[in-house]
Image: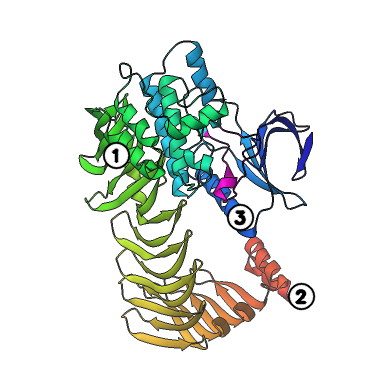
Amino acid sequence: MDIQIGGKNYIIIQNLSNPFSSNLCSLVKEKGNDNNNTYILTTIKNLSEEQINSLKQQINSISTLREDFEFNFNPITLEKDDNDNYFILEEMSEEKNLRTYIDEYKQSNKNIEEKVIYSIICQICLYLKVIHDQNIIHFNLKPENILIDEENEITICNFDFSKNLGIKNKISNKFYLDSYMSPEIIKNENLSNKVDIWSFGCIIFELFNLNYYFEADNIKDLLDKILNERLKKIDSNIYNPKWQDLINWMLKPNFNERPNIDQICDFLINDLVKKKEFKKEKEEEDHPPIYIEGEYLFDNLNGKLKCYVCNKLMLEGECLNNIIFKGRRFHINGDILFEGETFFLHKLSLRWKGKGEFLPKSIIDYKMNEDGIIKGEVLNGKLNGFTKIYSKEGIMIFEGEYSNGQINGHAKAYNDKGFLTYDVETLNGELYSGWKKKYYDNMNLRKESQFNKGKKYRQIIYNYNGEKEFDIIDGNQKIKKYYDNGKLKFEGEYLNWKKNGKAKEYNYYGNIIFEGEYLNGEKNGKAKEYHPRGDLAFEGEYNGMGKDMTIKILLFMNLLMGKEYLKNMIILMI
């Protein structure tokens, strides 16, 4: 059977739907495409406008985590047909899933190494943390929906977005149940992110024991075990017995008694046995000496961490399998720049979440201080909220409100000497109202511009000694402008903030470079232009679109042939 979506035809390879869900789910392949890519296709019908907006927001959040934070979520797109049915298309990778991975160990009669299990658990934990922080619940977490590559890096896939939309599925006559469903899903009540915690607990047990936590020969017995059976144990002679405490905690029948994902992260960081070690990073030519002092488990940073650069503490926090989970970041002068949480998967490529510093670079890259420091609130990888920006010397050069990565609201900016240059209200990154200031090199005021509703309303111009010379309202007046060294830059007439009438312009050293006329901000009429050394470079007329073409030709010939040839040409033309 073929399905047409977004102008493409897909062939159904396998039906993945279950009778417990009202949504159709299939494994499909694009027809006529030789790349062998497969997709999970989920059809959701009869959505309200609110549900459609929620679905789009969730998929956008997953895409942001994938593209901006480099989490290995599969690409997900949302399509719609002519009947207003929505299709979620998730591209699948070629890695095997965790079910196959566990079965291979079971068939070989071997246990999975504890350090490998720990790495897998830490990765799942961080994936759940980022989606739970986005108010997204997986609702379908099981080994079949966790992909794992040759380096034991995982990808979580096949979200059940319908439950995130509040779509309640009726139990059909052919009752469906799997071993990872929480009691709340079976009862279809009190659905929260704790259903993922339950499923995660089942998966952790299975990694240690290579068997299901809940299994039975029929649905009735399986249902009874999920609702009533507890306390299956892992082999404490092989593995740390504290894992049993975590599993028991995650499989509490009352969802309110289960840990949240932050508590599980804390358990992984703080409750397992660690060995304190010291490590010196390799010194490179373009780096100062970097030292890491931390707690290690399974040869990776797990627990408390301190990082020193040039013997100065630059970072302290807690690590989870080489991933910084939360901590504090310090400026070179010792001030705290950040205190909060981090998202951080690919070695030392990190993003901060919460109040604090937003750094897309390595935490131990000392050279990042050359670009200055940003302190603010970050949401979805973009500045949101009150923000301060400092120069590399530690001088504050900006403070103000951001929204979705753009300046919005009250903002102040300062120059590298600490003098106020902007005190304004902004809207969508544009200056809306308030004052903008410029200074001479002696730090006296050069000019102040007042804006109202996004347009310049008033301008006050000062001379080099700080004395007011012009106070212009609505841009209609004869004025003078100056360079930051105090030399005259422009003198002439303005109309509606545009040059209009006779004007003279000067270079940075005070030599005249133009005298002529303007119309609506453009040179228009008779004019003279001069070389920096004072020689006449042009004399003629502007027509609002540039110099007259005859004059351009004569000037070009002047450069090639000399002044005498030009003089003779003018006589012939007359």
What is the quadrant of residue 346 in the picture? Answer: top left
Q: Nearer the viewer, mark 1 or mark 3?
A: 3
Q: Which tag, 3 or 2, sits closer to the chain's start?
A: 3
Which residue shows up at 21% across the image and 43% down it? 312
User: Residue 441 at x, y = what percent?
Assistant: 33, 70
Q: Which residue is mark 1?
A: 318
Do the CB atoms of the residues marked 2 and 1 lie less than 8 Å apart?
A: no
Mark 1 is on which residue type? Answer: Glu
Q: Residues within 10 Å of mark 3 (few under 14, many from 20)?
A: some
Residue 201: which quarter of the image?
top left
Tag 1 secondary structure: strand
The crowd level at tag 2 (other Cα within 10 Å; few <14, some 14-19, many 20+) is few
Q: Residue 353: give x, y in percent of width and height.
A: 39, 50
Counting from the top left corner in percent of width and height, residue 172 is at 65, 39
- For mark 2, what is the residue? 573
Q: Which residues are magenta?
A: 156-177
Q: Which is more N-terminal, label 3 or label 1?
A: 3
